[in-house]
Amino acid sequence: MLLAVFGMVGFFAHGQTAAQKIGYADVDYIFSQMPDSKQIDTDLKSLQTQLKNQIDAKYQEFQKKLNDYNQALQAGTMPDAVRNNTERELQQLQANIEKLQQDAQTNLQTKQTQLMQPVYKKVGDAINAVAKENGYTYILSQQIGGIDVVLYGDDNLDISDLVLKKLGVTPKPAPNAAAPK
């Protein structure tokens, strides 16, 4: 895929005529500047805390039953039938905790997708509007999956701040990163 992107970039750069104009945008930078990002982060952290509390409560229940089981086992007062039943119950509790952890991860990912989808649509619409208003033929993404797609680009071709302005957001430096111009 990366080779195809490089080939495409080379084709666009080589075949660029006066009528073609190529720009790029850093969607992660744009998103980090938007007020929506803070609310999404807050909502996701809240859900994560809620899910963690549920898992912790189940784990504490498991630990208490395990401690009670170990004490009774050491005292030698547990009949075999009770021991077998308690062991099955502990195994079931452990399986429930593992399933709860998997479900929590799935719920968190689903919520993130649900919250991010409208924001990415809004950003995509703003990128399209800025591209049309400024006569760009192509807009490339600065990164895809954390991999730089634009290895070099004139800062004048970075439309990220124009997109932010289109969204009504005043660009400011991203924390711990140099903001594109």
Image: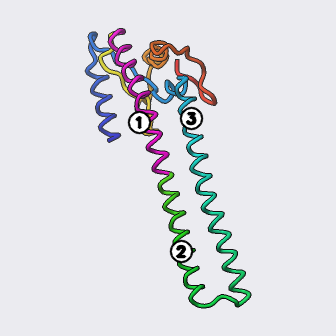
87 versus 5 height, above or below: below
The three-letter amino acid code for the residue at tag 2 is Gln
Task: Give the residue number, with chain letter if any, for mark 1.
Answer: 144
> Quick one: 51 or 132, which is closer to the camera?
51
Disc 2, SS:
helix
* Location of residue 122 (image quadrant): top left
* Residue beneath the point at 31% across and 22% down: 13
**Whole-number angstrom distance, CA of label 3 to CA of label 1:** 21 Å
Mark 3 or mark 1, earlier in chain: 3
* Residue beneath the point at 32% across and 41% down: 1
The three-letter amino acid code for the residue at tag 3 is Asp
98 versus 52 height, above or below: below
Q: Viewer-nearest of labels 3 and 2?
A: 2
How many residues crowd around disc 2 within 10 Å: few (fewer than 14), some, or many (20 or more)?
few
Picture coordinates of residue 76 (x, y %)?
A: 70, 90
Mark 3 or mark 2, earlier in chain: 3
First to last magenta residue range = 105-134
Disc on res. 91: 2
* Location of residue 2 (image quadrant): top left
Mark 2 or mark 1, earlier in chain: 2
Task: Give the residue number, with chain letter if any, for mark 3.
Answer: 41
Q: Viewer-nearest of labels 2 and 1?
A: 2
Picture coordinates of residue 133 (x, y %)?
A: 35, 9
> Quick one: 144 or 156, which is closer to the camera?
144
